[in-house]
Image (cartoon, grey):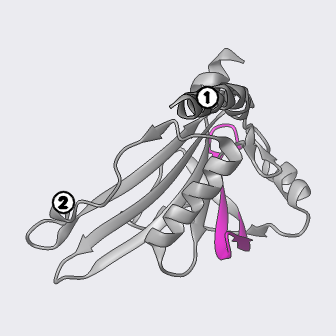
């Protein structure tokens, strides 16, 4: 019994010793994605990623809704960025009024999206610390509706003074038993912090 008590005390001391590591991982600010920083211009993004950025001509299109997203645009992307053994397209989302970077969207190519979501969540927890917001653990197939149309998603959010990082796994019911699914990783400027700067 005495050994059990001393083990519990040692584990408690160990947990308290690790607490500053968790806090320091959370307290470091994230000011963009990779070499991109919020407020950069297209030229600055191109210089930061030297030859990896490709130009697009059309505005960003929300592929699920098929609409132009007002107030922002994408003309620059990196295709075939490899992360977590998966190829991604990286889109640099610019503010239409200021022509400055506001968001970076990573969209994976391939399949097995649920597994990828779990893998990315683990990698992001390792890099950024514990999730700030976790909405639920699984997709609610009832939300796809009796007719097979509908949508549901699972989200994880990491909140930092300058950046919100959102990882989403989404499923869209397209009727007749057809389902579209995907994963999106979004780094977005925390606009509330911009006002404080």
Q: Nearer the viewer, mark 1 or mark 2?
A: 1
* Place of residue 42 in the rendered image (x, y in percent of width and height, measured from the top left): 79, 52
Residue furthest front as drawn? 1
Tell which of 139 and 151 is nearer to you.
139
Q: Which numbered marker is on residue 6?
A: 1
Q: Which residues are magenta?
A: 77-99
Instruction: Determine contact: label 1, label 2, CB under 8 Å.
Output: no
Tell me: residue 37, above or below residue 111: above
Q: Quadrant of residue 32?
A: top right
User: Relative to residue 159, is residue 79 drawn left or right?
Assistant: right
Does residue 120 show up?
yes
Quadrant for residue 20, please give it.
Answer: top right
Residue 61, percent from left and from top: 49, 63
Residue in front for this viewpoint, 62 or 121 = 121
Q: Residues within 10 Å of mark 1 (few under 14, many from 20)?
A: few
Q: Residue at x 84, y 69 (%)?
A: 52
Numbered disc 1: secondary structure: helix
């Amino acid at each position: 019994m005495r050994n059990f008590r001393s083990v519990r005390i040692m584990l408690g001391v160990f947990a308290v010793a690790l607490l500053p590591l968790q806090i320091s991982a959370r307290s470091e600010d994230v000011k963009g994605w990779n070499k991109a920083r919020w407020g950069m211009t297209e030229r600055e993004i191109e210089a930061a990623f030297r030859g990896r950025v490709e130009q697009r001509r059309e505005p960003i299109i929300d592929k699920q809704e098929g609409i132009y997203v007002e107030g922002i645009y994408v003309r620059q992307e990196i295709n075939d960025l490899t992360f977590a053994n998966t190829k991604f397209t990286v889109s640099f989302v610019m503010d239409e009024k200021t022509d400055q970077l506001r968001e970076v969207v990573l969209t994976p190519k391939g399949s097995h999206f649920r597994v990828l979501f779990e893998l990315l969540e683990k990698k992001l927890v390792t890099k950024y610390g514990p999730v700030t917001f976790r909405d639920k653990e699984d997709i609610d197939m009832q939300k796809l509706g009796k007719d097979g149309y509908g949508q549901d998603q699972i989200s994880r959010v990491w909140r930092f003074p300058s950046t919100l990082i959102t990882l989403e796994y989404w499923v869209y019911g397209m009727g007749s038993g057809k389902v579209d699914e995907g994963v999106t990783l979004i780094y977005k400027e925390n606009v509330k912090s911009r006002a404080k700067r």
